[in-house]
Amino acid sequence: MKFNQERDFTSYSIRAYSPGAINITLPANLEADKPQPVEVRTLTRSCIISPKQLIDDWAPNSLDELLAEHLQAIVALAPEVVLLGTGETLDFPGAEILAELTSRQIGVEIMDTAAACRTYNILMNEGRQVVAGLINPAE
């Protein structure tokens, strides 16, 4: 049986992750006269990614720096589920930081950044309104 991975060429997706570097595949220009090469941007800072938007310079560089105000940019994207990547290891922010998301009944999953990257692509390809806040500490 042959399996093919579905790919949405009109959305931001995560191509690869390693500590300190997230490779983002940019949406293709489907209106171009001829096929365009796949564009990949390597981010070395924390970021927020959704299928239609990329914020490539998110303020927290570690979970200790994460404040409730940092989540306002995520809330503005109207997600149904938020993935919070906490860096190389899984760690949980305080409930007061996540209160804005939970009060709006937005689902929140906390995981290490590598797992958040993988999960983002799966949910994005399912057509879910997913937003990932990825803490990506520089090495």
Image (cartoon, rainbow, N blue to C red):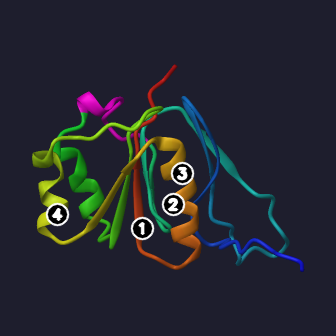
Q: Which residue is disc 4 drawn over?
A: 102
Instruction: Give whichever of 37, 12 is nearer the camera.
Output: 12
Kindly state the secondary structure of the residue where label 2 is placed.
helix
On the image, the x and y values in percent for residue 103 come to: 11, 66
Residue type at mark 4?
Thr
Reading the image, the residue beneath label 3 is 117
Q: Which residues are magenta?
A: 57-65
Task: Tell me the CA gap for discs 4 and 2.
Answer: 19 Å
Does residue 123 sit above or below 114 in this rendering?
below
Q: Earlier in the sequence, mark 4 or mark 1?
A: 4
Quote the CA–CA distance across marks 3 and 4.
22 Å
Give amino acid for label 1. Val
- What's the amino acid at mark 3? Cys
> Which residue is under mark 2?
120
The amino acid beneath tag 2 is Tyr
- In the displayed structure, 64 sits above or below 73; it is above
Give the residue at x 51% y 60%: 120
